[in-house]
Image (spheres, rainbow, N blue to C red):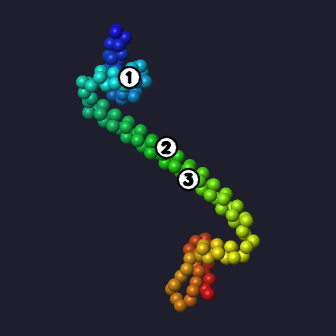
Amino acid sequence: MKALVQMKGRAIELRKKGLSYKDILTEIKASKSSLSLWLRDLPLTPLEKKYLKERQDSNISRGRIKVASVLHENRLQRDRGLFAVTKQEFDAHKDDSLYVIGIALYWAEGSRRSSTFSFTNSDLLRRKHLSI
């Protein structure tokens, strides 16, 4: 019983310093429900509320960054797999002239500015303009 009273006193002391439940539970071996019961009548100062809010926002930001990083890595891994499959398919058909022409037509963009039919590649590094 004495140990329980000491744990409760330590929990109150830590909460007054502005620590969150999670931080207090790392130091005190008690259940979260016990901690909640012990601290329910202990009001937080505006400074403590601000500190806890900042920590919560910081944790949310870190979580968002972590999720974005995982999603980015998943996309890169998926793209590497698609590239490997596409390369195999291209290697299998690269000697077929109709296949190569089909790829070129797909890659090019059409233009209807004049009475002639033309293909234009909008890639600034490889700009070509062919009129038929």
Q: Nearer the viewer, residue 106 or 55?
A: 106
Closer to the eye: label 1 or 2? 1
Q: Mark 3 and mark 2 in contact (Cβ < 8 Å)?
A: no
Q: Disc 1 designates what residue? A: 31
Residue at 56% from the left image edge and 89% from the top image edge: 116
Q: Residues within 10 Å of mark 1 (few under 14, many from 20)?
A: few
Which residue does the numbered mark 2 point to in the structure image?
66
Where is 3 relative to 100, above or below? above
Image height of 57 relative to 13, above or below: below
* Name of the residue lying farthest toward the right: 95
Instruction: Decide which of tag 2 and tag 3 comes sooner along the chain.
Output: 2
Q: Which residue is mark 3?
A: 75
Nearest to the observer: residue 7 or residue 94: 94
Q: Tell me the CA gap for discs 3 and 1.
A: 40 Å
Which is nearer the N-term, disc 1 or disc 2? 1
Q: Residue at x 68, y 73 (%)?
A: 99
Quick check: marks 1 and 2 in contact, CB under 8 Å? no
